Image (cartoon, grey):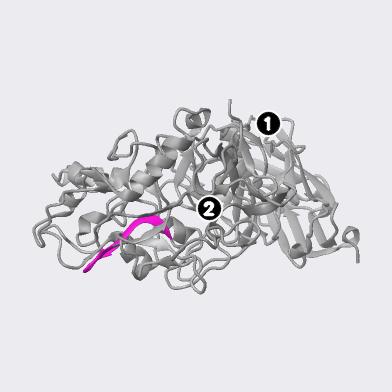
Amino acid sequence: MTKKYLIISIVTVLVLLIGVSLAYYTIQIVGTGSNMVMETAYLRLVLTDNASIVEDSIIPGWSTSKTFTIENKANANTTYDLLIENFQNTFVTNGFLQFKIESEDGYNTISDDNNYINVPKSQIAKKLVLAYNISLDKDAKHEYTISFRYKDSEENQAADMQKILSGNIGIQNGTESTDLVITDLDSSTLKYHILSDNGVYNTEWAEERTNFNTAYSDSARTFFRTNNAELGETVLYYAGDARNNWVIFGKCPQTGGKNCTPGRDLYWRIIRTNEASTGGGIRLLYSGSGLVTDSQGNKIIGITQNGYIGTSNWYSLDDKPNYVGYTIGTDDYTEGTTTLSNIRGNNADSNIKIAVDNFYKTTFENTDYENYIDTKAVYCNDRSTTDDKSGGLTKITIFGAYGRLESSKAPSLACGANTMGFKERAEWAYYEGNTYEDRYSKDVYNVNGVQFTNGWLDYPIALMTGDEVIYAGGNVLNNNLRAWYGLNASTSEITSERSIVGSKEWWTMSPTFSRGYTGVFNVLSTSGYFGRLNSAGPSVKNSYLIRPVLSLTANTKWLSGNGTIDSPYQINVE
């Protein structure tokens, strides 16, 4: 059977009116078929033609449309939300199943692709709000057309066979969205295109993961949300075998570098979005320079050069807990007397920070690219502890990330204390009479020293945290051969190189413990342990690979690309 005649056998049911509810009003459905009407005390939703879109199977190139109206029967102006109840979409591919909503007076989807946007994904049935708080004048009506299509492509679309798209289109009393809506973004920005390409027109549309007990390697559902971040704000992140989070940003400097031929493009992978309170930018993990070329100079799509800038130990000593710091606190350590406040200092840079800073200086400092690097972004070197050390550090000190990730399997993007963001911690310190500056703010690294941060970064660049690795699909007990952070697009190890002597692990920014020696989490890239977050023995004296992390500003302009390796996102550098 040729690609053109591939039939996508699915259950596609988009039912207008049935199941629509307004919490405040009694619903009455009048008539059937093309005369079906839904009435409330103040609003009426009328289906113009047949009640359902029901397809047992579709083929690439399929499309269909339905029309309906919403009327205001109240004696005053009102507002409503347009939604799909019991929405479910288990399609696997990205960019083929799309929809658009058109109205002269009401809500419209907007995109560069004839206003079609990707249908968001959801394994479970849920309420999906399409648009919030749409104004409707007294005695007025809004006429709508909703259209769906499954785009034809030369790509293999067989993964969508036997999948489901279903739901009930309806309305509810108008509400204000607390989430980021894509229409709030400039459509020329990279952030807009990231959300659009992943079918997230509203951050509420993104799915949430709640189980982090095992590694996550799915290739179908790779874009998620969490509010377990600073200030409880929404963060969007990539997980599993994501293949659409590639970005080109920067060039190898003229001085060259490890695996970096002068003038080659630098490739990065998108980790996540940052919290709005810290700039709302796009966080990137260094993933190599250029694309490997064959003997004729042709690019081999999918194979980036090794995704690290070199190797370094974290610090030259490992016998004191203060050596887990990205910057090092006091060197005067006395067991039972030295406190967390003492080790949270800026007396000296760690060796790993020196290496990362040197990469920034030679690659971005005083270049046009530097204008797009977010100085509001924060990076976390979490030195909170799992038990009370207010009386002084003891021979065995377990740091917060180890407790969250090794024991509880509960990652967090809120730096410092395990359950509070930095603003809440500052308020807690104030009301309890504690000195906040002596506590958690010293773990929150930032280049400008904005409120609730330490200001100890010389350059806006650092490392990935252990928590971010877990969100991305890692685990401390399980390998993950399909984790995006460990692979280039040809599914080879991105840190693989035959000339590497010894380990191919790479550093994170999250301390583990101090118990005879001091350790920081790293990520394993060796055979048999690939993709695992390692808490067992990464002494800060050991040398591991370095993979820097930086953030692009939220208003960085998109130039081209959809995030795949053959069409990576590129930004408009002016």
Q: What stretch is highlighted in magenta?
A: 506-518
Comparing 540 with 564, the one in front is 540
Decide: few, some or many residues near mark 1? Use Cα within 10 Å; few <14, some 14-19, many ≥20.
Answer: few
Residue 109 location in percent, x, y? Answer: 69, 38
Provide the residue designation for mark 1.
139
Cα–Cα gap, marks 1 and 2: 61 Å
Residue at image coords 30%, 35%: 449
**Would you say the residues marked 1 and 2 are in contact, meaning their CB atoms lie under 8 Å apart?**
no
Q: How many marks?
A: 2
* Residue 187 painted magenta: no
Q: In which quarter of the image is the N terminus?
A: bottom right
Q: What residue type is labelled 1?
A: Asp
First in sequence: mark 1 vs mark 2: 1
Q: Nearer the viewer, mark 1 or mark 2?
A: 2
Magenta span main SS: strand
**Residue 42 visible from this viewpoint:** no
Label 1, secondary structure: give it: loop
- What mark, if any, has residue 299 been given in the picture? none
* Residue 517 painted magenta: yes
- Tell me if residue 174 comes above or below residue 543 in the rendering: above
Provide the residue designation for mark 2.
307
Residue 190 location in percent, x, y? Answer: 59, 37
Comparing 157 with 464, the one in front is 464
Comparing 486 with 138, the one in front is 486
Residue at image coords 73%, 65%: 163
Residue at image coords 86%, 62%: 6
Decide: few, some or many residues near mark 2? Use Cα within 10 Å; few <14, some 14-19, many ≥20.
Answer: many
Relative placement, left or right, of 411 versus 351 is: right
Relative placement, left or right, of 193 versus 319 is: right
Q: Which amino acid does label 2 sit on?
A: Gly
Comparing 284 with 147, the one in front is 284
